[in-house]
Image: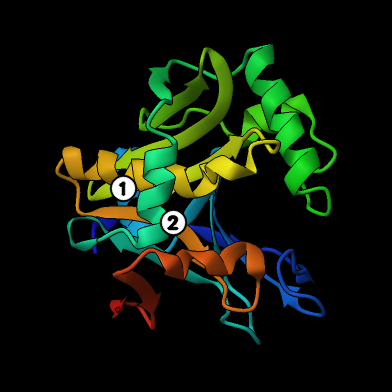
Amino acid sequence: MTSSLRNLKVYTTYPHECSYLEDKEATTLFVDPRTEVDGNLYSELSALGFRRSGSHLYRPHCQRCSACIPARIRVDDFKPRRNQKRTLQRNQDLVIDQVSDIRGDEYFDLYCRYIAGRHRDGDMFPPLRDQYLSFLSDEWGVTEYYQMRAQGKLVGVAVTDRINDGLSAIYTFFDPDMPQRSLGVFSILWQRQKASEAGLPYLYLGYWIRDCQKMSYKTQYRPLELLINGRWVDLL
């Protein structure tokens, strides 16, 4: 453990309603927002199961529940399934470019459509520009924005952080009226390929939650590693 981790100050929230599981209380562990974070510290915390929302680094810290399990794809051992290969083929026409920011109206309008179409029951509805900008902010010089276009039309955006041992898939939003493209699946497959091309061993996917449909899909990307009792173990 580095000295920066040993000296890290963290705080816990009061118990609050869980966003993922009904009738559950959640407690969140936050890194002190006054901490000077850089790419190295962020990378170390990612390997310990932390995620970020904007500049806030957090990890579930619930007393009576351990359902939220950090997950990452072992990039070079991953073999796409038949349906995933079909998803890659269906999206071969997409033009994907890195952009410097996603503050423009075109990006925010797509985000609004995505939240309204796919997450109307979630914490981010109704979508607000200030929340959008703070949630998907560029932090510590590691954030990369990728736009996906079909015949010039913006259809998806992937927000990805490049850390020391991988890419971290922060958030993807896409056109909810194009279910045939499976753009959420495609985004993960594309980011896995991007990590492989960069020689990075992992793609971090956030938390896997078995009993939450919106979070359980991550086991479709194997071999997957799960952080259990402080150790990354294979889910083959």
Alpha carbon of mark 2 to alpha carbon of mark 1: how far? 10 Å
**Label 1 Cα crowd, 10 Å radius (few <14 / some 14-19 / many 20+):** many
Instruction: Please indicate, yes or no, whether residue 96 appears anywhere in the rendered image.
Output: yes
Q: At which x and y percent is residue 225?
A: 32, 71
In contact (CB < 8 Å): disc 2 and disc 1: no
Report the mark closest to the observer, 2 or 1. 1
2 or 1: tag closer to the N-terminus: 1
Query: For numbered disc 2, what is the local secondary structure?
Result: strand
Residue at the disc numbered 2: 205
Going by the numbered disc 1, the residue's amino acid type is: Arg
Q: Which mark is residue 162?
A: none
Query: For numbered disc 1, what is the local secondary structure?
Result: helix
Q: Vertically, is 191 above or below 231?
A: above
- Write the residue at 58% across / 27% down: 155
- Write the residue at 54% across / 38% down: 55
Q: Vertically, is 54 above or below 214?
A: above
Going by the numbered disc 2, the residue's amino acid type is: Leu
- Write the residue at 63% across / 84% down: 65
Quadrant of the drawing holding the C terminus: bottom left
Q: Is residue 60 left or right of residue 131?
A: left
Q: At which x and y percent is residue 57?
A: 51, 50
Q: Is residue 39 left or right of residue 21?
A: left
Query: Which image quarter: residue 14?
Result: bottom right
Residue at the disc numbered 1: 192
Query: Which image quarter: residue 40?
Result: top left
- Write the residue at 40% across / 23% down: 96
Figure disc tally: 2
User: In the depicted view, which residue is nearer to us: 21 or 217?
Assistant: 217
Q: Residue furthest bottom?
A: 64
**Label 2 Cα crowd, 10 Å radius (few <14 / some 14-19 / many 20+):** many
Q: Is residue 235 left or right of residue 188?
A: left
